[in-house]
Amino acid sequence: MKRPLRLNILSRKADNVVSEQKNPRKEAQTKTLWIAPALTVSAAAVLLILFSTPDPSHSQTVSTTPVQTSTGTAMTDLETLNQTLMSLIPEPVLDPTTDPPGNFHTVTPGQFDPGHTNLVQGAWLSGIGCPTGASTFDGSTTASFTDTACPNGDVNDQRNQGLLLVKTGPTSNFAAAVAELINVKGITLTELGYDIRKSGLDSTSPLGSHCGAGAPRFDVVTTDGVVHFVGCNSPTAPLQSASATGWIRLRWNAAGLLAAFPPISPTDVVTRIVIVFDEGQDASGGPDQFGAAILDNIDVNGMTVGHGAVNAN
């Protein structure tokens, strides 16, 4: 059985922080949700939800109450909490005259760290991506090298960049590495995916980058206000291509998107997509407890982005 997914959610009283800004006068109201990630469980499955809510007028937790609920109710709670998280990550301001909606071309990483813990990082870095048309050098001669997991990729990536997402320490730390997909507003989805630096035959392998039920995940916001998530291992990507050199290409096609939580239908219109990495180095970050992932070739409907500004803080 897969381990549960944990989401740590701030209320609207909390700071909207992706950068280093913080308002010390505001106190955070938090909710912690544990929910079994498998989407194949029956509708009668019993899930455990733990809510922990600090009172904004006191510096203590008022209660932690276990609640047993049906799958349908749990899905509603998860949707509400994920909506709150997305509302706290500032949406980029784009000029529609220069960045027309629906023209996906950029992935902008950053950090959601309202407590200024300095334990999360999201950044493009050169030399860590899945090599397509790269070259090797043995001291005298140069040879071409392409990993079999990524026979094609971002043609604009000239430095073999990869997207590093890291969460150091415990999963309970309310912080996340994030990456905003730019210019996806107004589209419908036929495919989502990425390449992940990971050894093993498929995404369930404990070797290499972390690939859990909840991280890295796509949080997809649609025009009806629903936040859908597509976790690295929940739902499992229907299309997987692994190489012998430590990369796996993961793609969620129409069937995979219908298995999202809640399902993403072919008619759902997107307003926003963010990659979130918020699982750390404890048991909640299993099976590997690595707390880090390297991604490349972020895929939206067959359009891939595998490079960005190298400006890690």
Image (cartoon, rainbow, N blue to C red):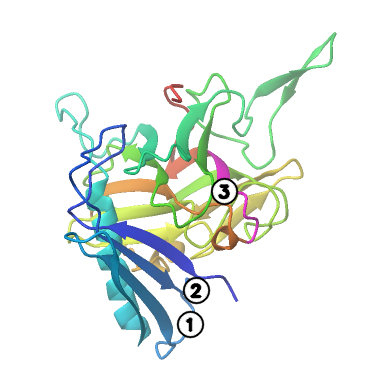
Question: Residue at 66% of width from left, 23% of height from top?
Answer: 134
Task: Determine the residue located farthest toward the front in the rendered image.
Answer: 59
The CA span between labels 3 and 2 is 21 Å
Labels 1 & 2 near each other (Cβ < 8 A):
yes
Residue 41: mark: 1
Of tags 3 and 1, the one toward the viewer is: 3
| Residue type marked 2 | Ala
Who is closer to the viewer here, 131 or 89? 89
151 relative to 31 in the view: left or right: right
**Label 3 secondary element:** loop
Residue 283, magenta (yes or no)? no
70 relative to 243 in the view: left or right: left
Q: In which quarter of the image is the C terminus?
A: top left
Span of residues in magenta:
287-295
Are there few (<14), some (14-19), or many (20+) residues within 10 Å of tag 1? Answer: few
- Mark 3 or mark 2: whose residue is earlier in sequence: 2
Residue 38: mark: 2
**Label 1 secondary element:** loop
- Mark 3 or mark 1: whose residue is earlier in sequence: 1
Of tags 3 and 2, the one toward the viewer is: 3
From the top left corner, tell me how far across and down residue 1 is, in percent: 60, 76
Residue tagged by mark 3? Answer: 291
Residue 293, magenta (yes or no)? yes
7 relative to 242 in the view: left or right: left
